[in-house]
Image (spheres, rainbow, N blue to C red):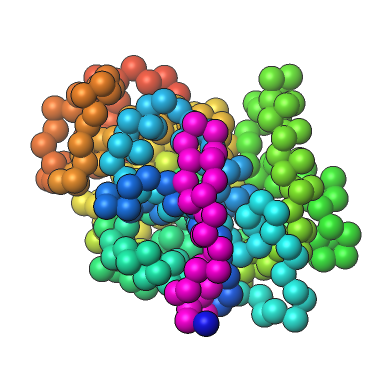
Amino acid sequence: MAKDDVVINLEVELDAWGGERHEVLTTHGPISVLVCGDREKPALVTYPDVGLNYLACFEGLFSCPEATSVLFHNFCIYHIDPPGHQDGAPEIPSNEPVLSVDDLADQVAEVLDHFKVHEIIGLGVGAGSYILSLFAIKYRERAIGLILVSPICRKPTWSEWIYNKAIVNILYYCGATSFVKDSLLQRYFSQEVRASPMGAEVLMNYRRHLDDHPSRNMMRYIQAIHQRGDLSEGLGKLKCRTLIIVGENSPFHCESVHMSTVMSRRYQALIEVQACGSLVTEEQPQSMIVPIELFLMFYSFYKRPLSHSSPTSPLSPPCVPPELLSSESLGLKLKPIKTRVAVQA
C-alpha cells in the first residue's frame, strides 16, 4: 500500500463543529487526522501535548464562539493526533519501534502530502509545539506561521529528565497510576484550577481521558520528547512569523522566554497569560483570541468576519514590530493578558 493511501475515511460529528476522520498510512506507521472545514481554504495544523489528543487539548479553544469566526472562517483545520492517541486507539504493538521527534515531524509532512497541502500555520501545545517547531525548521518553505502554546525547545533539564524517566517506567510497568495522572495534571493546569472546587470536574474529565487511552501509547510520545534535541540554533534562523503564548504558571515558562530570545524579534511576539498553566487552550482559551487575530492580520488571506466585533487594530501589516502587539498600544482591556517583548540575553 502506498504511504499516502487512506486506510479509514469516516465522517464524524464533534459537538458544534464536525469533520472527516482519516487514518493516513505514513512511512512511520498510521496516524489519525480529523479534517474540519473547506479544503480550499488555507491549512491550520494542530498538534497536542503529551498524554492528550486533539479533543482534550483544543476543545476549549475551538468551542469559543470567537474561534469559530476567527479560525473556522479562515482555515481548513487538520487536527493531527500523535500515534495511538486517537479515541478508541488500540495499543501499539511492543515490537514497533519508538518514533523519534524527527519521525513525528516527518509524519506531519507526509500527512500534508497526502492532503496535497503545501503551506500551513501550525498550532501546538507543549510537546506539540516542539514537533511543529521542528517541522518548521526541517520544512521551512511549508511553515508560514506558528502559534506555540507553552512551547519547549531545549533538551530536558535534569529535573525533567528524572521526571520523564519515572513517568515512562511507571507507564510501562503499572499503567496510568494516580501518580502519573497527578503529574500530568500539574503539567497542564495551574494551581488555581487544581485547588478550586470549580476545577474538580475538569480534572475528573482529564483523569478519565488518561484512563481511556493505552498507557504504553502515551509512554511512546513521552519517550520521543524525552530524547529531544536543542532547537535553539534552528529557531534563530527561522523566518516564519511566530506567536508564543505561555501561561504564567507553566512549568515551561522559562523555555518560552528563551525561545523568544533566540528567535528574530522581527518575526515573533511573546504573550504571557496570567494565572494560567501550560494548557492555555483549555484553562483560558478566550485570552488567546485577540492575540491570534492580530497575528493573523499579517497574512493576506485573513478575512475578518463582518459579524466579528473584536477590537480593530490600527496597525498595518506586514511591517508591525512585535512590541506593538501590546494591550496598551491596542487599547485592549483584556485583564488576563500581559505582553512581554523578547529580552536580550
Residue 256 shown left or right of residue 251 in the figure: left
Residue 60 seen in the figure: yes
Residue 137 shown left or right of residue 184 in the figure: left
- Give the vertical position of 31 relative to 27 (above or below): above
- Give the vertical position of 142 relative to 206 (above or below): below
Residue 76 shown left or right of residue 266 in the figure: right
The residue located at (27%, 57%) in the rendering is 144
Indicate whether residue 198 is drawn in magenta.
Answer: no
Decide which of 199, 248 is in the foreground and name it: 199
Q: In the image as oriented, which residue stretches furthest toward the right?
A: 174
Decide which of 144, 303 is in the foreground and name it: 303
How far across and how far down the image is residue 147, in percent?
A: 38, 48
The residue located at (84%, 57%) in the rendering is 175
Decide which of 288, 261 is in the foreground and name it: 288
Indicate whether residue 13 is drawn in magenta.
Answer: yes
- Give the vertical position of 304 relative to 258 (above or below): above
The residue located at (24%, 61%) in the rendering is 239
How far across and how far down the image is residue 201, in percent?
A: 73, 26
Residue 278 seen in the figure: no
How far across and how far down the image is residue 217, in percent?
A: 71, 63
How far across and how far down the image is residue 194, in percent?
A: 71, 30
Q: How many marks?
A: 0
Decide which of 36, 139 is in the foreground and name it: 36
Q: Quadrant of the C terminus?
A: bottom left
Residues drawn in magenta: 2-27
Residue 326 shown left or right of residue 12 in the figure: left
The residue located at (76%, 40%) in the rendering is 207
- Give the vertical position of 262 relative to 99 (above or below): above
